[in-house]
Amino acid sequence: MPEPYDPLTDPAPAHDLRAVLRIRAFRRLWIAFGLSSLGDWIGLLALTAMAKNFAGDDYQAANFAIGGVLFLRVLPALVMGPVAGWVADRLDRRWTMILGDLIRAAFFVSIPIVGTLTWVLVATVLIEIVSLIWGPSKDASVPNLVPRHRLEAANQISLVTTYGSALPAAVIFTAITLAGRGLGEVAIDIAVYVNAATFAVSGLAIISVAEIGRAGAHDHEDHPTLWRTMVEGWSYVTGTPVVRGLVVGISGAFAAGAVVIGLGRTYVEDLDAGDPGYGVLFGAVFGGLALGMGFAPRIFSGLSRRRLFAAGLVGSGVGLAGLSLIQQIEIATMIAILLGFCAGASWVSGQTLLGLEVPDNLRGRTFAFVQSAVRTVLALTLAVAPFLAGAIGRQTVRVGDRSLSYNGAALTMLIAAVVAGSIGLVAWRQMDDRPGVPFWRDVRKSFGKTPGVYPTTGLFVALEGGEGAGKSTQSALLVKWLEDRGQHVLLTREPGATDLGKTLRQIVLDPATGDISHRAEALIYAADKAEHVDSVIKPALKAGSVVITDRYVDSALAYQGSGRDLDLSDVERVNRWATADLRPNLTVLLDLAPKSGLGRFEERDRIEAQSADFHERVRAAFLELAAAEPQHYLVIDATQDREQIAAQIQARLLPLLPKIG
């Protein structure tokens, strides 16, 4: 059972990674999982290097041998994935993982002893079959070891560990091959034995995690075959342009990294870097991949998810082109890090977008389809790339008195670069959600921008939109829905929710106020927000209430920033300071053309009476803010019936609601 959560003794935010690692059972499983992942990557490096040695000096034979090992690593997942999951759900998970690690260790020990290419290929298949059962057992155990509110952080740690462990694996492999240069092929044998040792230690570590047990009866679910999964997902994916672009792009990001891994061994051979160079290149790609997954969304926070996704794909193509043309291992290593970073940025952005774009009732099969598609692309890339490189062979191009020699690996990377770059450009054209806004402006905006503070107790919801969009109506409907579900709700507004705010509201909205300085107006609204947050919003959130505010910081950015044509960064800085950078968990933007909204008023206050151009700028600003961080926004067409609008808001809020009792 997971350790009980006490907010007094465990006040860390739900996404805090250190808080997850303080849970003893999960920490021990994570250590074991990290060792298994480390061994898996060392095994990939060692087996491909061993296959190349068995093939001898024949360039084509070496590529074919490496391609065979890589293809056989993913083939069992394509054929036996559903069967392995079914088996894992019916066995004791703890002993499945213990025996799985020990069996994999034994297979790896046998490879140098037998010492043939045939056994390398056979053992690869057997090891992957065991891994297919081990992986679902681990994934299914995690929810039983951590509280529900920390599951997302636990999964994030697992994901980063999976790809991040490739870097230390590459360092270990490089160190072994460098230290054993005088030993020849024995150095590779040592790497295989080290790999076996990591699996053995992992198995012994899992013995201490007694909290892992047999799957309960409620865990048994239907596991569709790969074919059924692909057929069910195909109709939805092909019929939805955004999802179709995401699936193609995610597959392309994986293919870009797979090309480097599939061709890396022969690529570094032509650079005279040998096995140590292969380890360095391998670690550079996967180290960059882990960095991209972990940090790209935070670094480029000014980019919308869609723009980051497409930009990462284009960057992967550029990185592949650079690798194909560079003939120095040092520069190639730096390019490989950037390539991995771009591919990782696309992968994590694509996964997030799928979670936001796909309806809940279709999300499971869509993700299953994506996993199947990625495995298929990986299998094809890892198999085809080395064979294509072998078929091309070494080519020499003469330019006057000089000649340039490129091997098949480099030329195949160049072909893959053109494909990846083209996919990225197509994705950009189809998915750009900020047309007309320069890309580099968004990049510059990313630096110096703080991530903001999101409440971890209660729930903070802001309703935004232009005049007459229906915020008051939807606020009232939302309060009733929440109270019917047993939630404690506070409905508030800006400006005017406090005694000070009422006075400030009279000043800024009364037509009798007349013209005042635009900066003075912005500061009046900011003063209202400061009092509102400190005396109303924060106490309610601390008490666990659902706080609904009619307007918040986005209104200041839209009205005083874009509407009044003030410097947006100045307005944002003042308002973030006034609110202590407290941000809503969800902002609902009711989008309505200004002409339609203003037509609902017989009399207009000081802000409503502004020009049509003013209100058009306000609307555009709201939409731009929502496009920049779609994970925190829900944009709704406010021309719909109020019941339709309310249903969409309720569906988005349902999984975010605080637990009652």
Image (cartoon, helix red, strand yellow):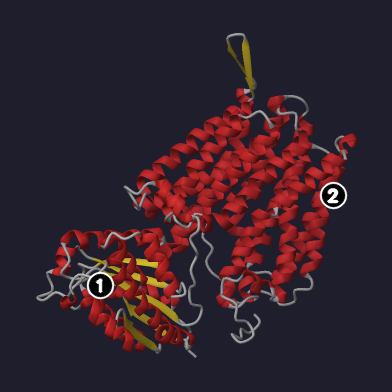
The one nearer the camera, 130 or 300, is 300
Q: Against 265, is 222 above or below?
A: below
Q: Nearer the viewer, mark 1 or mark 2?
A: 1
- The local secondary structure at tag 2 comes to helix
Along the polypeptide, which appears first: circle 1 or circle 2?
A: 2
Q: Give coordinates of residue 339: x percent, y percent.
A: 58, 42
Q: Residue at x 55, y 30 (%)?
A: 414
Q: Give the residue type that dot 2 points to.
A: Tyr
Q: Residue at x 28, y 75 (%)?
A: 646
Number of the label disc, if any, that sits on residue 193: 2
Q: Against 168, is 281 above or below?
A: above
* Crowd class of label 1 (few under 14; some 14 to 19; many from 20; radius 10 Å): few
| Residue designated by label 1 | 644
- Marks 1 and 2 sit apart, C-alpha to C-alpha, by 62 Å
Q: Give coordinates of residue 364: x percent, y percent.
A: 47, 63
The extreme right residue here reads 183
Asked whether residue 252 appears in the rendered view, the answer is: yes
Q: Give coordinates of residue 276: x percent, y percent.
A: 77, 38
Q: Residue at x 63, y 82 (%)?
A: 10
Q: Give the residue type that dot 1 points to.
A: Gln
Q: Residue at x 37, y 46 (%)?
A: 438
The one nearer the camera, 23 or 516, is 516
- Quadrant for the N terminus, please: bottom right
- The local secondary structure at tag 1 comes to helix
Q: Is residue 406 left or right of residue 481?
A: right
Asked whether residue 92 appears in the rendered view, the answer is: no
